[in-house]
Amino acid sequence: MRSVFVVALVACVSATTLMDHPTAGKVTQSQFGSTVLAELESKLQTGSPLDELLSILNDIRGRLTAAAAVDAAEQADDTAFCEHENNTLNTDITLENSAIASAQATISAQTAEIARLTEVIAGLDAVIATTEQDIADNEKEQAERIAVREQEHETFITNDRDTDICINAIAEIQAMDLDQLANGKNGYGGQQDDASDYQAGVRMTALLQKVAGKVNNEHVVSLLQIAALSSAAMGNDDVDRMIALLNRLASELADYKVELKNDEDEQLRLHQNAMADLKNVNTNLTAQLFQYNNEREDAGVAKDKALATKAAAEIELKDHTATRDALVTNQQDLTDGCNARAASHVLRQDQRKAEHETLNEIEKTLTTKLSKHFQEGGHITARTADISSA
């Protein structure tokens, strides 16, 4: 058989209370301490057993420990939440900063490209204007050369015609009977002169001057005038000299005709060569102008594209900056909220610690109060129970 002796103590206090203990003032400084102490005082006044009082204290201590555990769990959840959200925000902010840097780099690059293309376009515009002016000058020179060549050809036709007129006239004179001319028979023109009044040379001079009046070529006129002067000094007996003069004049006119033709051919050759060169230059200039215009168009398209890219990057920069700033604001709000919750947890932890200390003080006060009661001759009631078991 085993016996367990259970003693329950009931403190019987008549004239004093727990509130009278010297440490009670420290406990009652907190609302928690005052509440617990008041409850114990009430139990003590009604004669509650000591173990019931201690049980009350342990129950409160247990509730405080449970509340502290809940606080700790909440603090762990809050810490994990804050760390997760802060990491997420840091990642998002980093991504936005990267996007901002990319947009800024794009804007910088496109700004430089736009400046470069603007310079290229200005250079091409100047080259195009110069090339267009060169083409206009080339075409003007071609037109001038054509006009000069037409004038040269017209002059050749006139001179060649005058030369033919003189050659034909000289041939007619050569075909005349010069003896009859010396005797006063003027076969050129069908006129009959008094042989006693004119010498043959004078009549020859008149014929040559009459031919000279029909032409405008200065060289041909000069040849006729020289021949006329020479024939004026010839008498009726100088028929052979007249024939030689006519033959020489006819030869000079024939040579001059050949010279005219050679000059015409040479002028034509030079004109054709010059025109071929001008046309080649014009062809090259036209090809260059076509190339410059294509390059100008390409540069314009590239500049428009760069402007559009820059504009899009500026919009992206604005959007990403706004998003980043909003994230930074959210992160600050999160930090403030998390700091506030962390401070709240610390405050509750300090409160729980203070409450535990208060409980310890109350327990100490209770124990001290009872000890003093015994020392002053107080009495206790003991109940004894015998519990037997086989």
Image (tube, rainbow, N blue to C red):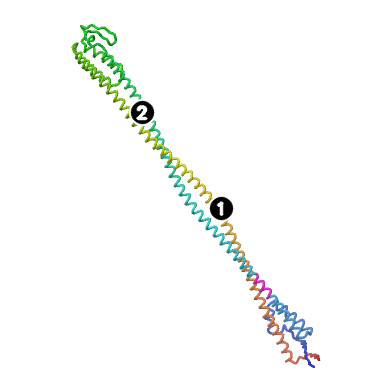
Which type of secondary structure does the marked residue at label 1 adopt?
A: helix
Task: Give yes or no for residue 71 being in the magenta stretch.
Answer: yes
Does residue 94 sit above or below 6 in this rendering? Answer: above
Task: Give yes or no for residue 72 being in the magenta stretch.
Answer: yes
Residue type marked 2: Arg
Type of secondary structure dominating the magenta stretch: helix
Is residue 174 toward the left or the right of residue 143 in the image?
left
Does residue 52 sit above or below 235 in this rendering? Answer: below
Residue type marked 1: Ile
Which type of secondary structure does the marked residue at label 2 adopt?
A: helix
* Image coordinates for residue 26, horizontal then vertical, percent: 67, 81
| Residue at x 41%, y 35% (from the top left corner) | 136
| Residue at x 51%, y 54% (from the top left corner) | 106
Q: Which residue is mark 1?
A: 315
**290 vs 47, nearest the viewer:** 290
- Quarter of the image for residue 166 reads top left
Whichever of callouts 2 and 1 sits on the residue coming sooner in the sequence is 2
What is the distance, in whole Å, between disc 2 and disc 1 at their CAs?
Answer: 66 Å
Q: Find residue 9 and name its label.
A: none
- Quarter of the image for residue 369 reads bottom right
**272 vs 328, nearest the viewer:** 272
Could you tell me which quadrant the C terminus lies in? Answer: bottom right
Identify the magenta region: 69-77
Q: How many marks?
A: 2
Report crowding for label 2: few under 14, some 14 to 19, many 20 or more residues within 10 A (C-alpha): some
Report crowding for label 1: few under 14, some 14 to 19, many 20 or more residues within 10 A (C-alpha): few
Is residue 377 toward the left or the right of residue 223 in the image?
right
* Image coordinates for residue 163, horizontal then vertical, percent: 30, 20
Does residue 371 sit above or below 155 in this rendering? Answer: below
Q: Which residue is mark 2?
A: 149
Is residue 367 toward the left or the right of residue 195 in the image?
right
Foreground label between 2 and 1: 2
